[in-house]
Amino acid sequence: MRKTLIASAALVFAAAAYLATPSHSAGAKETVQVDGVHSAVIFKVKYFKASSFYGSFRNVSGTIVTTENGVGSADLTIRADSVFTANAGRDKHLRSGDFFSAKEFPEITFKSDNVKHLGGDKYEAAGKFTLHGVTKDLTIAFVRTGRGKGRQGEPRTGFEGTFTFKRSAFGMKYMVGPLSDDVTITAALAAIIQ
Amino acid sequence: MIPFHLAPAPIVAGIVLLALWRWNRNSWAAGLATGCGFGAGFVAVAGFTFAPAAASDWLLYIAVAATAVGLLELAPRWVQWIAQALVAVGTVWLILGRVAEPPWESPLSRFAWTSGLGAALLVWSAALGARPEATRGFVLPAALTITAAGASFLLLQDGNAKLAELAAALSMALGVVAAIAWRYRELKLAPSGTGVAATTLGALLLCGWLFGDALPVWSLLAILAAPLPALLRTRRWWVPLALAALLAGAAVLIVHLGAEALPAEDYGYGYD
């Protein structure tokens, strides 16, 4: 009888500990800090309607809060002057008033108080996307790409999402035609679970 | 879509010719034509934006305000001065206000920047329009055409293609005024047209300086000095224009040499 009680208690504690971990507790809230060094934010435009051109931003930061059942939040910031296309002249042109006007609008942001878990690895964030000083509503579908532990043993996770918008809607009208109005952004975020 | 470099030409020619021969208005004809020509060029280059989001969106409204001031021909001189001062300081205030991470830290420091640059713009504009009777004819508009063209090259070198195209549109508008003035020697650009040209060009260069990568101050000073030889008293019309071209060329050269002197950041292939 005593052995049965001890075994039952151990089982209950083990189950509680298992459920208390962020990845397994039902309705658990998880806050993650974006690891900018290991994240990638890339953009794609069409060049002369013929080919796809890719560039990236090298400075991304922010926080994402997810819940298994409830509503989470996201607050992400990209430095506009971190635009990188592997060509110094083109990067300078992209930072200028022709495109991002980085000295006027130094940050590209996405803020959401409505991050929903759709089940499995799927999430959806509805919020405000600010680019070039213009803010518009945007809904981004994204997935959790995995979980793991870093070199220091810190718990890590990742998210990836893709969305498309018209840059002219954000006042970036220069060279629409040679460079497409549609811009597709893919954010592959590495994050440390807090 | 009308090519931006052609958009100002028929508008400027139409307004100047109508104003001169139909309405017999020499005093504001060139100013109205320059302002409308630049406005047409702006819409062809950048489209029409309301409400303005970026600093460059304000350039159209700044040109409209400067053109309106040029039309105040019947107002007392002091009213014209106050209006010019308001447009100059307002232009600087609007553009400086768009800098997200400004070098000025206190409101007093920002006031000093605004009033200092506003006063400089007002003095430059007033100097160009100071002798309207002596500067009749094509030399002053031609010198300003060269200056605006130089500013266009300057801004292009600095990586601001849109601002460069806008300066080219202003150069085209002034060039048409100069061409008409070659034939009609009584045409006056000053003070209405010099006010529009100086305010618009000043705003373009200020945008380039604040939002571009590195427009050297010496280059800006050279380009601002370029139209001033047109105020010289000389019978040889080509001397002021040669000096204007020399100063504008020096301004472009300084930017080019400055860019060449920067550490190589390239990744092995060109960009155009």
Image: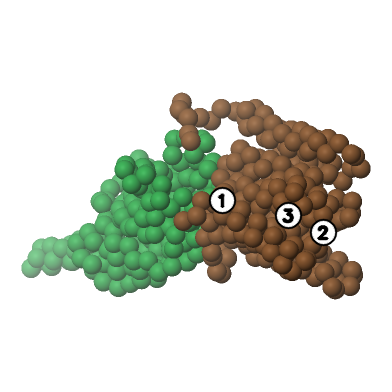
Chain colours: A green, B brown
In this picture, residue B247 sits left or right of residue B215: right
* Three-letter code, disc 3: Ala
The residue that label 2 is drawn on is B191
* Three-letter code, disc 1: Leu
Badge nearest the viewer, 2 or 1: 1
The residue that label 1 is drawn on is B6
Q: Picture quarter containing residue B73?
A: bottom right
Q: Looking at the image, which is closer to me, B125 or A17?
A: B125
| Chain bearing mark 1 | B
Badge nearest the viewer, 3 or 1: 1
> Mark 3 or 1 closer to N-term?
1
In this picture, residue B177 sits left or right of residue B124: left
The residue that label 3 is drawn on is B197
Residue density around tag 3, few if under 14, some if 14–19, many if 20 or more, within 10 Å: many
In this picture, residue B200 sits left or right of residue B159: right
Q: CA distance from mark 3 to mark 2?
A: 10 Å
Residue at 40% x, 51% y: name it.
Answer: A177
